[in-house]
Amino acid sequence: MQLESFFPYRLAVVAEAFSRQLVEVYGHDHGLTREEWRLLFLIEGAEEINSLELARRTTLDKVQVSRATQRLEDKGLILRSIPAEDRRLRLYTITPLGRSTFARAFSQVEARANAILGAMTEAERAALDQGLAALHRAVANPAI
Amino acid sequence: MQLESFFPYRLAVVAEAFSRQLVEVYGHDHGLTREEWRLLFLIEGAEEINSLELARRTTLDKVQVSRATQRLEDKGLILRSIPAEDRRLRLYTITPLGRSTFARAFSQVEARANAILGAMTEAERAALDQGLAALHRAVANPAI
DNA sequence: GTGCCTTCATTGCATATGTAATGAACCGGA
DNA sequence: TCCGGTTCATTACATATGCAATGAAGGCAC
């Protein structure tokens, strides 16, 4: 078996290459790490969201969430508060600066992603989309 | 836009989840890192292979290759030598222990991968395969 | 051959990351 | 109310990683 034609390797290489393209945008142009980018994405999309929900929806662990949200707060992109209902948790909301930063970063990231996907045919994109969805189900529920 | 339905995120999450399944096998069961696994894969497949070729074919940089091959040598899985033609390079060959370790790890990794892919239909696997190949081309050559 | 530039692997160092330890807060039962 | 167990975020520490610096080796011009 050649490494280059081994499916798991091909998947990893393509995903890394695609991700690198986007990190170049939100990382280099906007100074966000991958974790910060994902968290900002979720926090922007919610009125307010707590730490448990963040960890669950990003596949990040609690330490990563704690560190990345701390950095986002230091940069003035989000606010952290402690909910009275459960003082162990943290509640996050986006700031106006965070919102505008995200909006600019998102449009550039989307443009870069579309530039890549735009080099594929409609049929290829559909195949990829369906294949990925199927793989997602399969990983969560393998055959024995 | 919801993070969970954003294509780049879906791709990254599925690739990570799939990779984690395999790391569990070659990492936990055989004590190999991802870099070591990839390098052993290539070294096993070649009579002998040099450092430049390894870096090129794994998308690892030279520091990663240097460190991972050092660990593989420490474990007795590969041998490193200096070619007389160009004494700056390193030449790697697999040891009998390396070969048997790889063989066992590979069959288990393959089995795990097949257990996941086996939960997909033939059509889904074909779609994924073609979609990935197309994305690979597109990443290397985006539309503008 | 000698000097100078390039190309390698390796090493050093600063930073990031993962895992275990800590401590705050909560909950349920006595 | 108090105590023990549980669930959180955070911190500490050891290790990994990325990047720049180093030094060996090669190649070319002279």
Image: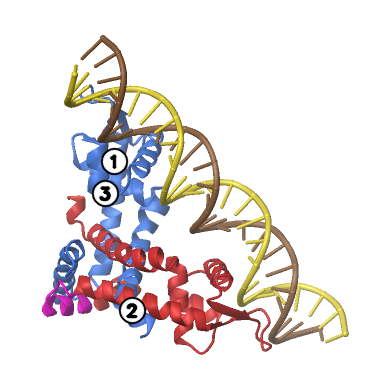
Chain colours: A red, B blue, C brown, D yellow
The answer to whether the residue labelled 3 contacts the one labelled 2, judged by CB atoms less than 8 Å apart, is: no
Q: CA distance from mark 3 to mark 2?
A: 32 Å
How crowded pointer 2 is (Cα within 10 Å; few <14, some 14-19, many 20+) is rated as few
Q: Can you identify the residue that label 1 sits on? A: B100
For mark 2, name the chain.
Answer: A
Residue at the image point whose x is 23% and y is 26% from the top: B86
* Pair 3/2: label in front: 2
Q: Can you identify the residue that label 3 sits on? A: B58
Asked which quadrant contains residue A107, the reply is bottom left
For mark 1, name the chain.
Answer: B
Q: Which residues are magenta?
A: A118-130
Q: Secondary structure at mark 2?
A: helix
Residue A41 is situated, as x and y percent measured from the top left of the image, at: 43, 79
Left or right, B85 with reference to A29: left
Asked which quadrant contains residue A130, the reply is bottom left
Q: Secondary structure at mark 1?
A: helix
Discs 1 and 2 lie in a common subunit = no
Predominant secondary structure, magenta span: helix
Residue A9 on the magenta span: no
Question: Callout 1, which amino acid?
Answer: Ser
